[in-house]
Image: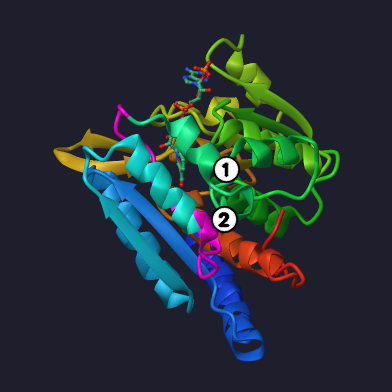
Amino acid sequence: MTATVIDGKAFAAKVRGLVQAQVANLIEVQGITPGLAVVLVGEDPASQVYVRNKHASTIEVGMASFEHRLTVDTSEAVLLALIHRLNADPAVHGILVQLPLPGHLNSELIINTIDPAKDVDGFHISNVGLLGTGQKSMVPCTPLGCLMMLRDHHGSLSGLNAVVVGRSNIVGKPMAQLLLGDSCTVTIAHSRTKDLAAVCRGADILVAAVGRPEMITGDFVKPGATVIDVGINRIERDGKTKLVGDVHYASAAAVAGAITPVPGGVGPMTIACLLANTLTACCRANGLPEPVGLTA
Ligand code: NDP
């Protein structure tokens, strides 16, 4: 069997198109421009690239982008004061603090200071609790992107066996909650799981969020299963730097029914879902109906 490739790049372009159309409508009919504020502390090269991409994508869909670049030695008090200002600013509907923060800053405190209604990353403890109890929340972007692709591919996910490998707060746990919300039977695997390959072979939907290059090989995959590879790993191969996922693509694609590639799978969906969340936050803040096709 050769798996169908789930084209995250094309799907993300479709999602951005939906966001753009709804933003244009919001501006024209309501006179409201959704706004996203991104806060970057320090000069981590990877974070700088992410922030630049977020800014460009925000502008592209017609939203307002507010960038706040602070020096690496910024004090907690200064950062908290900025977040309070953004919380109070009616032009800002979404706030994202780029992680990781420098070590002297308390990330949990910073994230939990963001107004939960503007927490477009979905990391605030209130949003975690709302998602866990099946209530309306802001949903973390990467798992939301995975869910959208799975719904698009399968239609209903009800009754399917899903295995999520990884239990981080930003990917594994919210992914599992979302799949449970769509009535999958969910198993969360991690580094202490016994016979991981056998656990994974029970999955109709296998989500890999491990952070280990190409760890999930074809013998972890049930024939016909859908494999979602969240991993982004830079490795050296044949003297070149290469981007690979947590799934060994060639061997898994030979067994799976459908699979996301790296690059071009989950990655592009993450920014698309950040824009979707900003639009959702803006609609909610203004008492307008939720945007169509862009929420969990
Ligand atoms: P974390 O390091 O926070 O979590 C990794 C998880 O994998 C942990 O729960 C860990 O288990 C588990 N794990 C590690 N080794 C093994 C193993 N040998 N067997 C089974 N489980 C194992 O990573 P993240 O969740 O933040 O990220 C996961 C991957 O997703 C990374 O490659 C990251 O780069 C990528 N990523 C991609 C994004 C995108 O936009 N596409 C966004 C965010 C992340 P334990 O808890 O027991 O230690």
Q: Provide residue 98's location: percent of width, then percent of height.
A: 39, 46
Q: Which residue is drawn at 82% across and 52% down?
A: 156
Q: Provide residue 278's location: percent of width, then percent of height.
A: 56, 63
Which quadrant, please, contains the N terminus? Answer: top right
Q: Which of 82 and 174 is in front in this view?
A: 82
Asked whether the beta carbons under mark 1 and mark 2 sit within 8 Å of each other, the answer is: yes
Q: Is the magenta stretch mostly helix, strand or loop?
A: loop
State whether residue 56 is above or below residue 47.
Answer: below
Does residue 104 appear anywhere in the picture? yes
Residue under label 2, please give it: 6
Does residue 202 appear anywhere in the picture? no
> For the residue marked with disc 1, what is the amino acid?
Ile
Label ID, residue 228: 1
Q: Provide residue 279's location: percent of width, then percent of height.
A: 60, 67
Q: Which residue is drawn at 58% across and 85% down?
A: 27
Q: Looking at mark 2, is its residue's CB closer than 8 Å to ligand 1?
A: no
Q: Which of 200 and 158 is in front in this view?
A: 158
Q: Which of marks 1 and 2 is nearer the N terminus?
A: 2
Q: Which image quadrant for residue 225?
A: top right
Q: What element carries label 2?
A: loop
Which portion, as a residue range, is magenta?
A: 87-104
